[in-house]
């Protein structure tokens, strides 16, 4: 985690990737090594929502192509290895007025009242949007106890165990971090769901519960649980009137149908895991 040596080991790949990002105007910034072997995080500079997501899509394609050129395989699976850390898509969001002023800015580490309204909306809609944040079977393997992955609708100030985080920093930089999504999620849909959740909170004008201190998995056991399996997320999405009001009935039904078919196909497959466990025993 945060190892400099690990970055030096893949310096040729990183140099090629940064050059490709510069050529395609993808604002790649700081790189850190993460908890699993070969796991890296590269932050992209902020911008307006649609431009930022367009850049994220180009970035993912560049990573894969540059990795191939260096004889490596890059993956954005949420959980590529069972006993190693998974990969998330952490989305950072702020709200500005027409003059470019950050409306979440506040000396209070918890942010302005508008920021807290947005947090309340995000927490309230997390379960209903979970199928967007975690769209595949492998997405749910990432959610393990005692890890830096949220399992309940919690928020906190500079707390990496919660579902909605307000990072530390100067008052003018105050923003929201949404770390729920896996790296396998569609960034366009994630951004749409995050913005829709924030909008609901801003319109309702409600405040969230008290921010969680310490490990949210042990200190916030009364917080609403998130759907930790594909079937539950499918059901919550399909029943959500909020999702239908934000995404439209046609999209909600079509997305549900596609993911239901994918889930059925996944469970219909007889895998090596079945053979290892049952081939001789049965």
Image: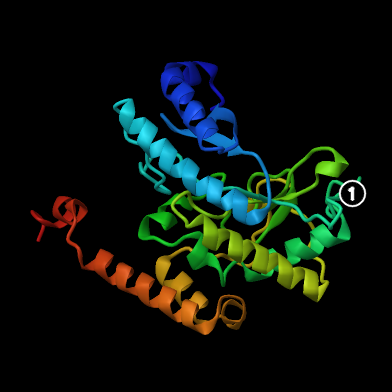
The percent position of residue 274, horizontal first and vertical second, equals 18, 57
What is the quadrant of residue 265 in the picture? bottom left
Q: Is residue 260 left or right of residue 191?
A: left
Residue that appears at 53% across and 65% down: 130
Q: Is residue 267 visible?
A: yes
Q: Is residue 83 left or right of residue 250?
A: left
The percent position of residue 199, horizontal first and vertical second, equals 72, 69
Residue that appears at 85% across and 46% down: 109
Q: Secondary structure at mark 1?
A: loop
Residue farthest along the right direction in this orientation: 107
Most foreground residue, 207 or 23: 23
Most foreground residue, 49 or 279: 49
Residue topped by disc 1: 106
Q: Is residue 123 visible?
A: no
The percent position of residue 81, horizontal first and vertical second, equals 35, 41
Most foreground residue, 176 or 21: 21
Pick the quarter of the image with the C terminus.
Answer: bottom left
Say above or below: 143 vs 21.
below
Q: How many marks?
A: 1
């Amino acid at each position: 985690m945060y190892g400099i040596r690990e970055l030096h080991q893949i310096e040729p790949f990183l140099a090629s990737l940064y050059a490709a990002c510069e050529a395609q105007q993808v604002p790649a910034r700081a790189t850190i090594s993460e908890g699993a072997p070969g796991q890296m995080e590269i932050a992209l500079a902020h911008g307006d929502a649609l431009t930022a997501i367009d850049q994220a899509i180009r970035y993912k394609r560049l990573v894969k192509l540059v990795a191939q050129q260096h004889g490596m395989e890059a993956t954005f699976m949420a959980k590529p290895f069972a006993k190693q850390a998974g990969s998330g898509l952490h989305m950072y969001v702020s709200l500005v007025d027409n003059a470019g002023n950050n409306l979440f800015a506040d000396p209070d580490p918890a942010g302005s009242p508008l920021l807290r309204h947005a947090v309340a909306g995000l927490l309230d809609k997390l379960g209903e949007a979970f199928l967007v944040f975690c769209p595949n079977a492998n997405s749910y393997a990432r959610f393990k106890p005692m890890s830096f992955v949220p399992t309940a609708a919690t928020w906190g100030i500079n707390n990496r165990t919660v579902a909605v985080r307000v990072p530390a920093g100067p008052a003018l930089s105050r923003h929201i971090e949404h770390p729920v999504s896996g790296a396998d999620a569609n960034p366009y849909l994630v951004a749409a769901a995050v913005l829709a959740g924030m909008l609901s909170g801003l319109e309702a004008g409600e405040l969230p519960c008290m921010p969680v201190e310490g490990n949210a998995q042990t200190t916030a056991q009364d917080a609403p649980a998130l759907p930790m399996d594909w079937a539950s997320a499918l059901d919550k999405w399909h029943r959500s009137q909020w999702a239908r009001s934000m995404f439209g009935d046609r999209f909600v039904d079509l997305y549900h149908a596609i993911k239901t078919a994918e889930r059925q196909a996944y469970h219909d497959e007889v895998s090596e895991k079945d053979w290892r466990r049952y081939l001789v025993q049965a």
